Image (spheres, rainbow, N blue to C red):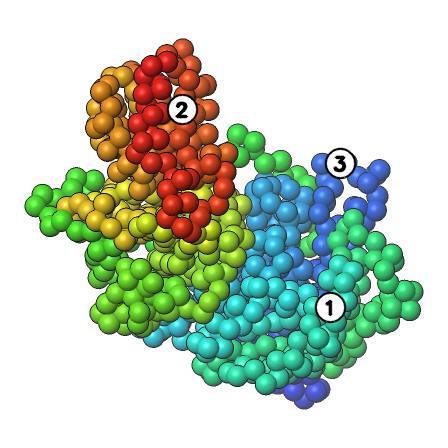
Amino acid sequence: MSVPSASVRSRSRRDAKHGVDPHVDWRRVAYHALVSRALDDVEEATNRNKATIPREHLVLYQFSARGHEVAQAIVGSLLDRPHDAAGAYYRSRPLLLSLGLSIEDALASPLGRSGGFSDGRDIGVVCNLPNRGCPVVLPMSGDVGSQYTPTAGWAQSIAYYRDVLRDPSYAGCIAVAFGGEASVATNGFWSSLTVATTLRLPMLFYIEDNGLGISVRGDMQTPGANIAKNLASFSNLLVRDGDGTDPAECARLLGEVVDHVRAGDGPALVRLTVPRLSSHSGPDNQRAYRTDDELAADAARDPLPKLRDYLVPAALSEAEWGALEADVQRDVDAALEAARARPAPDPARIKRFVYAEPPQAGDAEPFGGLRPDELQALGGTDTPADGGDTVRFAEAVRRTLRRELEVNPKVLVFGEDVGVKGGVHLVTEGLQRQFGAQRVFDTSLSEEGIVGRAVGMAVAGLMPVAEIQFRKYADPATEQLNNCGTLRWRTANRFAAPIVVRMPGGFGKDVGDPWHSLSSEVTWAHGLGWRVAVPSNSADAVGLLRAAMRGSNPTIFFEHRSLLMTSDGSARYPGDDYVLPFGRAAVLREGTDVTVVTWGALVHRCAEAAGRVGGSIELLDLRTVAPWDRERVLDSVRKTGRCVIVHEDTLTAGFGAEIAATVAQEAFWFLDAPVERVAVEDVPMPYHPVLLDAVLPSVERIVAAIERTLAA
């Protein structure tokens, strides 16, 4: 812990004399606990008196922290290093207040006012705090348990900055994941616990157990309703259990676990029991599932009276406590008035920050990703170098990863089997030997953990490149992927997490199946905030992957299995600085009679089909589907009057439907024939080659579609 100020040291000597833990700034703890309770009073009164409160001042989603305040405020007082971080959840406002959240912002965010956590874009308790040079609260999401793996990613970043980049400011820093007892049943909790313990990360799990996940009791979340007891023999984990309403016990246990993690002795978990003194949320009525005796027992455990009894008169006199309460009431009243005076968010700005964009006056630099000066130093050119050797697709990706690892010390490459083995597709073969296991490393078998950790690393300023072995295997990480895509928008550009997720998929050479051969790129085109690259050849793979790794947006980089397994996508290496902008389609063949639009491995089948047809075919390779080159497609269709769209995804709601709808809307009067789509019928990918050939768009099917369109 840092050395306290002279005033704190003086108070500590007095506190020690009177039996109060001298290592805690108790006035600070009491102030923030009282403020949190006062804010709950204001919000709950607002919800109870809707008829007398102007509607624009209502808190539409209210989650009380009653009963949780004191222990959280103590934790906040212990987070005092410049790179400490917390992964919070919806009852964490006491923590945020103790880490610098203004009372005005604490009220304005639930009111949906301008500014605050999200400028009115997200629920007021979905919090964040982009402190620079001070403890940061990572941007949380509305999903229970989703805070754990990004916090583990931040903890791993602390170790990387400290041990590999040799930055002394990270020494002793920790990451703390906050959660309730219900969250210990989630994938995120167990994934992050596995990572933290196997890697001995500087991470603290803070579990506040109020016995209820809405209405479900704790014994439905973990056997015996005590996660600390169940984890007592977990390797590489210090476990402590105590009463979260007892100030002295909280201070002792929290001081112990924080000191343990700061000392580099590995992760710790502390479970503190607390009462839930309000319903789960504003609309909930806990009397429907709790007895009067249970409610009375919780009320008797209110930590605020216990805090007062602990401090008065041992550390504060009656007059000092009364003055503190008066200060709190004054500050909350002033903040409420200021929060209500804030304007509603500007609807004209609602489309901003889905992606990174040039800053405007008043925009803050987002917390996360590479700094602008770092991106500028990396540079790049969209002109390919001459004379490159011909490389296959897998070698092109490997060479690009190698180069970026060489020139950017913040690049990390990881996933299941990417290290010693070099990946199941051997794309990362040799990279760990060259750059070491701290930069190219294997992970446990948890896609939630892979992507969530990447998010935490990116927020910490690193450039994580995560591999998901096959597209279908990304499904367990859908929550983290979706949250990452909307992170910049949800925080109104306060945070960003530009990760790269390499995702092989699609049919293989003469083989397919429902698990390894899924493409479904439309899923991520629909994932707001994501860029999606589907290169058809080695040169484009180099340029798009480098653009992703030198960019400011999260990117899905789709590596087609057929291209990884064959020489179909071979091309000349375009150079170590080649960067291909997203949203720029390639015109592979110019023509005047029909436009064929495709991407990925089917580009090669379309090229063969175009050579078999007598008409003048214009062949476009989209290269990226988010964003996609609308104007180039529309210009081509306006010239040819006909359009055939070919893709590997299933027909219904595939990305081809979006292109067809755009063409119909924007170029209808130029069309001389209906728009054709050639895609996989609405069945999963089959295993036997005969069945696979029956569903994939073949050259013959593509030729037939072009000829039908020409004849119409």
Q: Which residue is mark 2?
A: 676
Q: Which residue is mark 3?
A: 55
Q: Name the mark on residue 440.
A: none
Residue pictured at 62% horizontal, 74% vertical:
25
Q: Which residue is mark 1?
A: 220
Residues under numbered marks 2 and 3 in contact, where contact means CB atoms less than 8 Å apart: no
Most extreme residue toward the left is 387
Residue 619 seen anywhere in this rendered image of the structure: yes
Between the C-alphas of marks 1 and 2, the distance is 53 Å
Residues under numbered marks 1 and 3 in contact, where contact means CB atoms less than 8 Å apart: no
**Horizontal placement of 377 versus 49: left or right?**
left
Between the C-alphas of marks 1 and 3, the distance is 38 Å
For marks 1 and 3, the one nearer the N-term is 3
- Is 49 located above or below residue 252 in the figure? above
Q: Position of residue 657 (x, y in %)?
A: 46, 29
> Quarter of the image holding residue 264?
bottom left
- Is 182 located above or below residue 388 in the figure? below
Q: Position of residue 211 (x, y in %)?
A: 76, 69
Residue pictured at 84% horizontal, 68% vertical:
299
Screen quadrant of the C terminus: top left
What is the secondary structure assignment of the residue under circle 2?
strand
**Residue kind at label 2, given as amino acid type:** Glu
Between the C-alphas of marks 2 and 3, the distance is 51 Å
Q: Position of residue 8 (x, y in %)?
A: 58, 77
Closer to the camera, 205 or 403?
A: 403
**Residue kind at label 3, given as amino acid type:** Arg
Residue pictured at 78% horizontal, 48% vertical:
283
For marks 1 and 2, the one nearer the N-term is 1
- Is 342 located above or below residue 463 in the figure? above
For marks 2 and 3, the one nearer the N-term is 3
Closer to the camera, 116 or 281?
A: 281
Give neighbour class at mark 3: few <14, some 14-19, many 20+ (Cα, 10 Å).
few
